[in-house]
Image: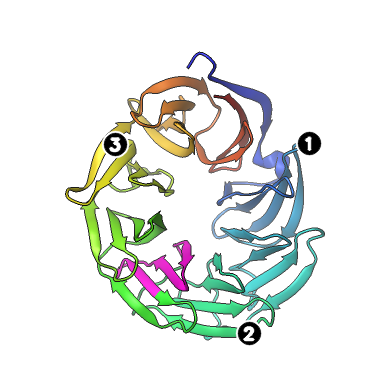
Amino acid sequence: MANCTIKMDKWVSKAKDIQPGIKKPSVSTPVMDAPSGKIYLPLKQGHPYSGAWLKALDVSDLTVKTVWEDLVCSSVLVTEDKLFMSPINLGKKRLICLNKNDYSVLWIWNDVIRASSNMNPSVGKSDDSIIVADMDGHVYCVDEASQKTNWHYKCPVDKDASRSNFYIENNRLYFGTSKGPSIICLDMNTGKSLWEYGGQEKYTGGVLNFCDNALAAQGSASLMILDKMTGKALADIPYSGYFGRNENDEMIYTPFQPCADYPFLYINDIEKGLVCYRYDEGSGLEIQWSFKPENSLTGAFHILNDKILCATGDTKGKNNKVHLLEKDSGVELLTAKTKELAFYIVPCDNRFFLFSSNGQIELAHVEL
């Protein structure tokens, strides 16, 4: 504890610094690419979108460059030498592959079953295939080498996988859906459904590895531990959700970013803040601790060995902070003030880039 420090850097980058003239900016999940030393940042303006960009922040000199303009994209997939993006505003260009070095276009895939303006960039990757989903309930497996569609899966009626991440293991593809069933498992070779786990979630977004035989998932109102082979629920408990309303009846959110470290599952709860659950085969999921400063929301968090870095801010957008917590107890060790509530934390050695939902970037130096 004596050697732990949090120091906020004087450097701050606002959305207008990244993209001059931008109005009502918002960002989606930033992606760190350690080999290139860049953080890829999807940035957009207004809703309906009147401008969108994919930016690259160089962590060595803190400069920002434009990778692509006029691209509404909420996630980016980065590999050793390529960038994959699935835009929603470029006609039939459903999956774009760029050279990571010079951002030149390598190929564009548009072999969609239904041409729709609702393609949402939910993208995943296996060894030789790209998985992409749209808001009409279609999931596609695209061969990376030939750009041919290996298979196509249609989610059950009125459901889609566009808000979920994809988790791939042992030739199985796991993802969440909107409006239930909460989780679907497909055979990666054929696209055939192996099992579906029921439920009437508004949607299930976070699907992640929990242990050798189980998945963890965070829905809009419940937490689930499922057997990977059968889809049997090992635990399924309600929680308060990730969104609510403040005293002015305005919608408020916490980041939807669960993290698993068996036997523990960490999630944001609109009422309890950052919550640590412990899983036991006999008793299921039980709360170990929760952290929530008075009148505050919890934002992004990141696990650092035996510590957790956690952002908070009040419902009026003030009193924003970043905290260093003990991982096993949730006890606060240190705190530092921030200008905005961080919705994403991207680590780079002992530096941590804090991204707010409106495009502002701050930099914290943490010594453990």
Percent across and percent down for residue 216 are 35, 55
Q: Give the residue pinned by disc 3.
A: 272
Whole-percent x, y for residue 353 in the image: 61, 36
What crowding class fits label 3: few (fewer than 14 Cα within 10 Å), some (14-19), or many (20 or more)? some
Query: Which region is colored magenta?
Result: 162-185
Residue 171 is one of the magenta-drawn residues: yes
Write down the residue under mark 2: 148
Q: Looking at this view, is 33 or 232 the one in front? A: 232
Q: Is residue 128 visible?
A: yes
Precedes in sequence: disc 1 or disc 3: 1
In the orientation shown, which residue stands out farthest toward the front? 212
- On the picture, is 337 further left or further right than 50? left
Where does residue 99 sit, x and y in percent of width and height?
Answer: 77, 64
Camera-nearest residue between 45 and 83: 83
Helix, strand or loop at label 2? It is loop
Picture coordinates of residue 102, whole percent (x, y): 82, 59
Amino acid of disc 3: Lys
In the depicted structure, whether residue 132 falls above or below residue 307 = below
Q: Which disc number belongs to residue 61? A: 1
- In 3D space, how far apart are the residues under numbered discs 1 and 3 (Cα atoms)? 38 Å
Crowd rating for badge 2 (residues with CA inside 10 Å; few <14, some 14–19, many 20+): some
Three-letter amino acid code of the residue under disc 1: Asp
Q: CA distance from mark 2 to mark 1?
A: 40 Å
Displayed quadrant of residue 194: bottom left
